[in-house]
Image: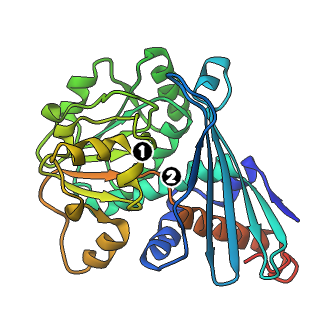
Amino acid sequence: MIEIGFDAVHQLAGVGALIEPLRRAFASHQASPARAQYALSEGPEPRSLLLMPSWHRDAIGVKVVTVFPDNARRGYPSVNAAYLLFGDDGAPRVFIDGRALTLVRTAAVSALAADLLAPEQPEVLLMVGTGALSRYLIEAHLAVRRYGCVRVWGRNAGKAAVVSRELGATGLTVEVATDLESAARAADVISCATLAALPLVQGGWLKSDVHLDLVGSFRPDMREADDECLRGACVVVDTRTALEESGDLIDPLAHGVIAEADVATLNDRLAAHAFAPRPARKTVFKSVGVAAADLAVALYLVERHQGASGATPTDAGSAA
């Protein structure tokens, strides 16, 4: 069996390189049923287990994810995952570090959405959240737009400073935002990746043509943006199941702020992109994760791995 570990994922695929494979995947119609989600505990920081299968032609993949919010206090990743690819004979062929795959996939999907929805000449990018994904999302947005200023805000200013220093070591200049409201008012693109239960970003703070990238909320009791953030916005999701899973959409739908019929998917937006320019108004992209994107990234990683090792698809057990 081929094994592609955490470091190997990053060696084989940068976030920017995944945008086009994902563009093709979202434009196609791969089988990707709604993920199964299970609550492992109750309380203010419930633990979750997610199962995400997808298949396309001879490729079958499934990701198993655990979300343990309390891990952060112990210095461990809050999200862990394993990805398994099966061959055309139904046998397991490839094991991929699912946490690394999720990080690069999630960021690349946000980059794809921003390429379709973000202002053409933004000046300020604001990253809300200081978890592992924040670094990848900043890289993702920089892959599709140029910014004069990049800022990061977190509840813990010390963690925001760490993100700034780490990205500074790669040559990027990232400022720490000490006040979320003033930072949001100045931002042209805001990316949020938190485990917040209550809205952090307020619609009254936003520019009229801001692009809001909402990543964190994947349960009804999680929210990163208030209702006003979505009022009058062009709203796009990675999958329509987001309308049933994320509090960022469930509550505005229930309050009549947005209508389900007005929410588009990335597939819809890609189909319309050749004929319609970017909306000249506020845009919101809400992602909860879709298994078809995981499969597309997994197949890309296997292809790159085979090329780097000199293996052929046969050598890899017909993994792809």
Circle 1 residues within 10 Å: few <14, some 14–19, many ≥20:
many
Residue under label 2: 106
* Residue 274, horizontal then vertical, whole percent: 26, 80
Left or right of 180, for residue 95: right
Front-most of residues 213 and 216: 216
* Residue 305, horizontal then vertical, whole percent: 76, 67
Disc 2 versus disc 1: distance between alpha carbons? Answer: 8 Å
Task: Answer with the quarter of the image where residue 238 lies.
Answer: bottom left
Tell me what residue is drawn at x 41 percent, y 62 percent.
239
Left or right of 283, for residue 309: right
Whichever of labels 2 and 1 marks the residue nearer the N terminus, that label is 2
Front-most of residues 139 and 3: 3
Confirm whether residue 171 shows in the render. Answer: no
* Residue 210, horizontal then vertical, whole percent: 20, 46
Circle 2 residues within 10 Å: few <14, some 14–19, many ≥20:
many
Q: Does residue 317 sit above or below 3 in this rendering?
A: below
